[in-house]
Amino acid sequence: MTFSYEKLFASRPVSRAYPVFLLRRVARIYPLYIVVLLVTVAQDLRHASNNHVQLHGYGIEFVKNLVFLQGMGFSERIVGSSWSVGAEFVAYFLFPLLLAATLGVFRA
């Protein structure tokens, strides 16, 4: 990621580069994640309906999954491998600090 975003962060202050970086990452990952999440939810609801199973707390878990809390251990995963997406977003929030630490320069 450093190679991909090095020019962005080198050409402007972190305070201006970081929002661009975060928006690009969200635009790349979030749409597909939402589609997969909604398809999985539809399958879960259909299965629960067909088998007369009540899904207690499923709505809360859905909201937590929407904001990637499943990747930090605060929620059950609706999509099996989605923990990695949540963990990835934690890394995105830490990325500017890690970038500054590795480059040895922090430009405000």
Image (cartoon, rainbow, N blue to C red):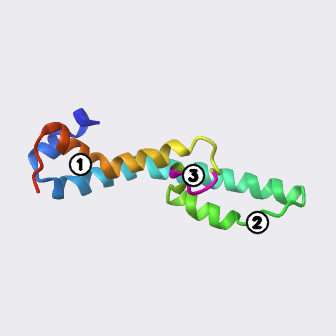
The answer to whether residue 80 is above or below residue 35 is above
Q: Amino acid at mark 1?
A: Leu
The answer to whether residue 104 is above or below residue 50 is above
The residue where tag 2 is placed is 56
- Give the number of the disc on residue 97: 1
Residues at marks 3 and 2 touching, judged by CB atoms closer than 8 Å: no
Say which element carries label 3: helix
- Give the number of the disc on residue 18: none
Residues at marks 1 and 2 touching, judged by CB atoms closer than 8 Å: no
Q: Is residue 35 left or right of residue 18?
A: right
Q: Which residues are magenta?
A: 72-76
Rendering quarter of residue 61: bottom right
10 Å crowding of disc 2: few (<14), some (14-19), many (20+): few
The residue where tag 3 is placed is 35
Q: Nearer the viewer, mark 3 or mark 2?
A: 2
Residue 94 in magenta?
A: no
